Amino acid sequence: MELPKVSVENMNVKISLGGLLLNVLYVRFGYFYQSFLEHSHSMKSYELHYIPRGQGILVASGSKYPIHPGTLYMTGPDIVHEQITDLSDPMAEYCICFEVLANQSNDDPELSFIAEQFVQTTFWFGQDKQNLMQLFEQLSYETANRYVGYYLTIQNIIEQIVIKLIRNYTNNYPTSSAMPLKTLDDERIVIIENSFLSDFHDITIQQLAQKLGLSVRQTERTIQQYYGMSFSQKKTRARMTAATHLLTMTSMSISEIARHVGFSSLEHFCAAFKKYYNVSAGEYRSLRKPSDLNVTSQ
């Protein structure tokens, strides 16, 4: 089975993990049909090597390491190394070269731990236990097809590769960081959104305030802050949105729709709808209804 090719040479890709900023100099794939002679990298360069297929020997700082399928190794600043391939079973390699642009302190202990492990580990050799092949397959797919959002997706995949590299280093060392939790404001926004989705027809400001654990005045201020409108305007918008959906997607009469969205009379609904959309409910339906919908307008 042919391995997927990857080439990121001229693309300006930078990834940030807390205070660690990495410039991705290149991502390459290739086969070793001849050995790669002894060399080392600059003081800010780190090279990730993943060998999905083939055999060989890595010579690093005078020591020899046997390479087999699934081998992963990292060579950082001043690590003199040489890759000797087995010509009867040439090594295939995915290689990413990183340049450290910044490594600043960060308040997040987990991100600080990742940054520290990356920068301080100038050499590591072992077998990949994090299924990096899957990520390189995804990277190949994105670089080959370049669908909308591919640049951000490539950044995200390489970030995942770095994180899984650190997991290999630490043998899945458990994190001590707590999962970020939703704030009280987040919880309140969820309550507001759900209330206007399900109870828009008859909810009152007093009922919503009780759900939020706020005063009526605080509730009004919260809605104004997050939505830029009053409770009454937010409720009208929710009702009108529901009404347009029912007008275009159901055969309910306009009278039924008026009652369903919380209006006490057809006249009140029709006046409110026309004021909101500058067109009557009947005209809105005739302009937008699906051709296969059998609709009665009254």
Image (tube, rainbow, N blue to C red):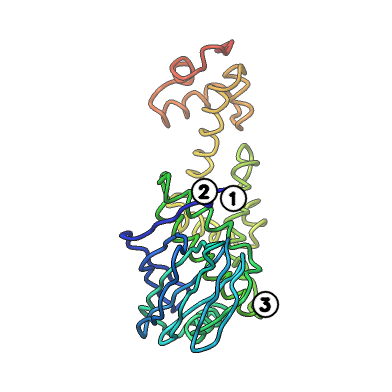
Q: Nearer the viewer, mark 3 or mark 2?
A: 3
Give amino acid for label 1.
Answer: Ile
Q: Residue furthest front?
A: 88
Give amino acid for label 2.
Answer: Phe
Determine the secondary structure under disc 2: helix
Give x and y (percent) for residue 286.
47, 14
Mark 1 vs 2: CB contact within 8 A? yes
Q: Residues within 10 Å of mark 3 (few under 14, many from 20)?
A: few
Q: Quadrant of residue 238?
A: top right
Residue underneath mark 2: 231
Compared to 127, does 231 lie above or below? above
Viewer-proximal residue among 83 and 246: 83
Give x and y (percent) for residue 195.
63, 47
Whole-angstrom CA distance, mark 1 to mark 2, is 7 Å
Tell me: 150 left or right of 65: left
Q: Residue at x 58, y 69 (%)?
A: 164
Viewer-proximal residue among 247 and 68: 68
Q: Nearer the viewer, mark 3 or mark 1?
A: 3
Q: Residue furthest left?
A: 10
Disc marking residue 285: none
Give x and y (percent) for residue 29.
45, 59
Disc marking residue 171: 3
Q: Residue at x 38, y 65 (%)?
A: 26
Disc marking residue 205: 1
Q: How many marks?
A: 3
